[in-house]
Amino acid sequence: WDFDWMGASESDVSRRLRYVDIVKQFFDNYASTSVFSIHRMAPLGKQLEGKDIGQWFGPYGTAAIIRELALKSNHELSIYTTTDGTVYLADICEPDFKPTLILVATMLGIDRVNPVYYPFIQASLTLPQSAGIAGGRPSSALYFAGFQGDEMIYLDPHFTRPAVAQRQDGQYAESDLASYSCTMPRRIAISRLDPCMVFGYYCGTLESLIDLRSRIDLLVDDGMQTVVSFDNGNSPSAVDAASASLGGGLRTDGSGPDPHSDAGGSAPMSLANDGSGVLVKLPPSPSGS
């Protein structure tokens, strides 16, 4: 964290409370604030993936579970998932953009990562929108945050710790939450990585999303083999869902109709290219077409 835990300044107090609010979402219990607890992930793994407790979740299964938990809790963060690497921008921007975590689940080889993807794996981690890469080696899940030469720098969170007791936000001590941060980064050769992984990108604003697209496009222009591409429209599944709902709105994750919208909801915003490569949002025409 980037604050003085014991500091009394308004900035330190605000950042500390925000940090506690984030960490509480991962507490090991069924509290309403523990949105992403293992207690909530395990049943969804059975429901969505047919995985019993104790079995490994695959990259897409994990991403899908995170997305579903965020939806169920009406989370402030929208989770967008893709398995073919295509990010459909209209899915994210309609009806209104909200801070979005893009999770790209992919398999970059059979037993090992195809070397053609090495440059993109490392370049991805240099992007300002990067939220890291979840992957690892066979039967070992790791979190990659950087690289040095041909080695990837990772954090390994798999250490058993006592559960943290629920308290009022202002009553947590630094030691209570210390185990939620890893202080021992390690390294592994990129050639040893398991090919199954999830790339994460956080876009807090529409401008950040547009910038991410521009940066990925530049990597493609440089001849790099990427695993992410962008499309201005809606995903095929989102279009089908919208048609089936007779014009209902789309959820911000693009996975189907918005359960909170009216069947005859207002016309959505549309996306267009202004000729400079910048994506802009256009309001509906007066006729609603």
Image (cartoon, rainbow, N blue to C red):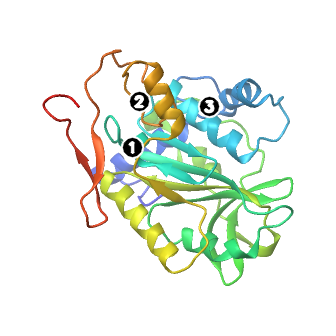
Where is residue 93 drawn, in percent x and y?
35, 42
Q: Nearer the viewer, residue 234 or 155?
A: 234
The CA distance from mark 1 to mark 3 is 42 Å
Mark nearer the N terminus (2 vs 3): 3
Nearest the camera: 129 or 27?
129
Instruction: Please name the amino acid that badge 2 sits on.
Output: Leu
Badge 3, how many Cα within 10 Å: few under 14, some, many 20+?
few
In the rendered structure, find residue 250 and report the number of the disc placed on it: 2
The residue that label 1 is drawn on is: 90
Q: Earlier in the sequence, mark 1 or mark 3?
A: 1
Residue at the disc numbered 3 = 165
Mark 2 vs mark 1, CA separation in Å = 9 Å
Relative to 199, residue 58 above or below: above
Residue 1 in percent (x, y) is at: 48, 58
Q: Tell me where residue 135 appears, x and y as whole percent.
A: 72, 57
User: The residue tagged with tag 2: helix, strand or loop?
Assistant: loop
